[in-house]
Amino acid sequence: MAKSNSFKPGKHFLQIPGPTNVPDRVLRAMDYPVIDHRGPVFADIAKRVLERVKLIFKTDEPVIIFPSSGTGAWEAAIVNTLSEGDKVLMFETGQFSSLWYEQAKRFKLDVDFVAGDWRTGVDPKIVEEKLSKDKEHKIKALFVVHNETSTGVCSRLADIRKAMDAAKHPALLLVDTISSLASIDFKHKEWKVDVTVCGSQKGLLLPPGLSFNAISSKALEAYKKSNLPKSFWDWKPMLEMNKDGFFPYTPVTQMFYGLDEALNMLMEEGLENVLDRHTRHGEATRAAVKDWGLEILCKKPEEYSNSLTAVMVPDGHDADALRKIILDDYNMALGMGLAKVKSKIFRIGHLGDFNDLMLAGTLAGVEMGLRKSKIPFKQGGLMAAIDHLSK
Ligand SMILES: *Cc1c(COP(=O)(O)O)cnc(C)c1O
């Protein structure tokens, strides 16, 4: 069979947990002339998008859109709300929380980074303990990666919010929803999140290139006191110009056409139906993995992620060798293990523009790859998933 870059017939299966498959409707919407980003047509699109995107974050407060990957929106969340030397609380849930932590240190924040095993999420009990002890309210912010894309562990944000309230602590809550928004339930307003960070390329049905900060009025108050240098990421000129559908610098115009169409699609399906679809696909995938006799990296069922599943391969086996077989022979990309879990796990992305048959195809590809590999497993996981999907 042909390897490497030669033509492969049929659709490529992009089943990494982001970037995800971009629907044809979104690609078509982006195939449109570049227009004046300071003209009336673009302003109308931008105003409509900035208003409607709030529905996805479940907020009625402003959402800022940056021309960047998600990492930029992390930085924006930090520099707009905090000051040098501020004490903040973060949890090592996996690679993404570790990278956000490294970024926070570079901005000279004083980070209490609670070590973790990369198999569990943020523990609401530790949040409550740490905040209750902080009588002088030295901790300025709690950072949470809602869905840890490197491990397939979803932290229980509603319980984390409850823990903060129980401790009666005024810390800001900064949340990364890059791989959960529009796939796992998230409520910016109800959970009193102060800055929600997101990116375009996972549940939002878009290519990489846009990032988001949904902000609360409390975050805007914090902005006034924050002394970290900010220029490109500064919220203020954005908010002022966004009122008329404009931006302080050139926005990614094509991505706004795409986002407009992605919002149409999410609304047509209904956001709650979108979330239910991801729940079913998460359950069906886990049914397959358990039937294969393989272990899911996430330890606690209440923290299972419905946008991806990280699967462990038994000791002495190499998950990347399996991924290579599946890419070469079945034209499907699966997510690799990052950093601490490199070659120990593979990740199945089941988020974004995705349906039952695509999941069946994805799991068939994994099962066929397992047969060609030396990894011990039991055949039939695909059937277990199909049984679940047919219920
Ligand atoms: C993908 C991802 C990121 C990184 O975003 P970039 O767009 O690559 O900068 C950060 N956090 C989470 C949870 C992610 O899934």
Image (cartoon, grey):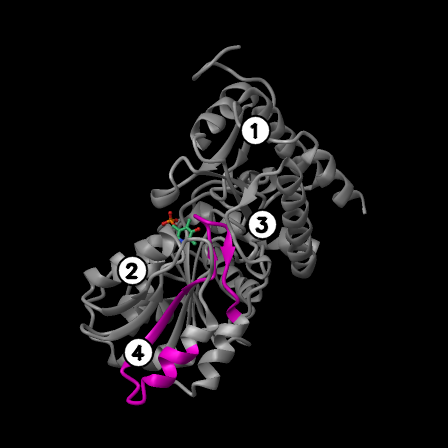
Q: Tell me: 292 left or right of 3.
A: right
Residue 339 drawn above or below residue 97: above
Among numbered discs 3 and 4, the one appearing first in the sequence: 4
Percent of width and height locating residue 195: 41, 69
Could you say whether the residue bearing mark 4 is in a helix, strand or loop?
strand
Work out how far the residue at label 2 is from the one at label 4, CA to CA, in angstroms: 15 Å
Q: Which residues are magenta?
A: 128-157
Of 11 and 278, which appears nearest the observer? Answer: 278
What is the crowding at mark 2: few (fewer than 14 residues within 10 Å), some, or many (at least 20)?
many
Numbered tag placed on residue 261 in the rendering: 3
Q: Depth-wise, is mark 3 or mark 1 nearer the camera?
A: 1
Badge 4 vs badge 1, beta-carbon distance below 8 Å: no
Could you say whether the residue bearing mark 3 is in a helix, strand or loop?
helix
* Amino acid type for the residue under numbered disc 3: Glu
Numbered tag placed on residue 140 in the rendering: 4
Note whether ligand 1 is within 8 Å of mark 1: no
Note whether ligand 1 is within 8 Å of mark 2: no
| Residue beneath the point at 22% across and 62% down | 105
| Residue beneath the point at 46% across and 24% down | 324
Which residue is labeled 1 in the image? 376
Among numbered discs 3 and 1, the one appearing first in the sequence: 3
Work out how far the residue at label 3 is from the one at label 1, CA to CA, in angstroms: 44 Å
Percent of width and height locating residue 293: 62, 38
Work out how far the residue at label 3 is from the one at label 4, CA to CA, in angstroms: 38 Å
Work out how far the residue at label 4 is from the one at label 1, CA to CA, in angstroms: 49 Å
Spot the residue most to the right: 391
Is 270 magenta? The answer is no
